[in-house]
Amino acid sequence: MKKLAVSLFLIFAVVSGVHAQDELLNLYASVGYGFPIGGRYVDSTYKYDSGNNPLTDEMDDHYLNIGRGIKLDIGAAYRVMENIDARLGLEYSGGVPSITKEVESIDGVGGTTTSKYKYSQFGIKLYAVPNFRIVELLDMYLGVGAGVFFNFTSMEIVRTTDGPDKYEAKVDFKNKPSFAFLGLIGANYPLNDFAWLFTEINFAAMNVTAKEREVESSDFPSNVNEDMRLTSGTVDIYEKGAHDRFAPVKTPASNFAIKAGIRFFVL
């Protein structure tokens, strides 16, 4: 990754020229999808045979990355120096599709437990963006920056049984804001003097740390899924180094995203 970044900036140094537009301010909007870089193992979907032994050849492991999913961006870029923009943007990221695991139960009531992880992020991002042109054919740009992301995660749990009973619970996680290191590379495609299309690849490096787990609602009886602590109102506080509390749960959110959008020049 470091070699790639150095190569890109060397290309910028060699081929940069006068940018095709002299406008000071542009507004932009884009949509894309983020692909995970790493993940936290949360569980597996698996089945049992008649002897209650897991069928390992039918297991499906699930890994959670909160940066994975659809991305929606809006923002503005202002020309602060020749060929260099300062870009301020807002990003919404939603976990689509959600992570769902299913586990066949082997206790006295049988059935299946389904857990669906839901997550989203809202980020404020600031970049420095040098613009350059390659051999008078393609207007491109690079960007480096940082951002603050607010993270929202929850889990919906449904337990069916071999009888008529069905239990449901919703668990909410409170998370600390995440600081992210950001990068991007993109290309512009002029439509006219006032609007450009663009495509870009975004990179974000960050983790999400949970500080609290709360069971918002649950109708699970005390003798079902006791190990999941699903009594309504149960609150678990995560704290590092505390002997009477759970250790903080860290979940990767690093990702690279492919986006397409449009920018409008207003000044």
Image (spheres, rainbow, N blue to C red):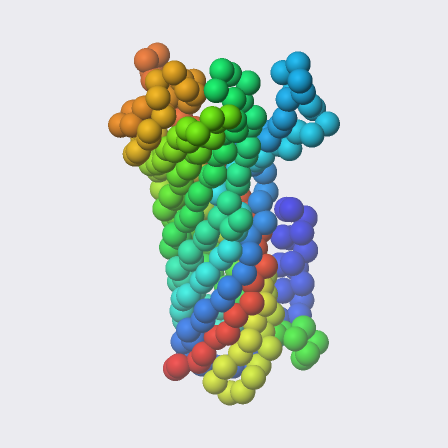
Residue nearest the viewer, comparing 254 with 145: 254
The residue at the far bottom in this view is: 193
Measured from the top left, where is residue 21 in percent x and y? 51, 81
In the image, is 28 to the left or to the right of 3? left
Measured from the top left, where is residue 12 in percent x and y? 63, 64
Residue nearest the viewer, comparing 203 with 151: 151
Residue at 54% x, 60% y is 32
The residue at the far right in this view is: 57
Residue at 35% x, 12% y is 243
Is residue 140 visible to the viewer in this orientation of the structure? Answer: no
Q: Image quarter for residue 23? A: bottom left
The residue at the far top in this view is: 243
Against 38, is 202 above or below? below
Q: Image quarter for residue 170? A: top left
Measured from the top left, where is residue 215 in percent x and y? 32, 30
Residue at 35% x, 18% y is 222
In which quadrant will I find the C terminus?
A: bottom left
In the image, is 130 to the left or to the right of 120? right
Measured from the top left, where is residue 37 in percent x and y? 59, 42
Residue at 30% x, 34% y is 216
Residue nearest the viewer, comparing 266 with 46: 46
Is residue 199 visible to the viewer in this orientation of the structure? Answer: yes
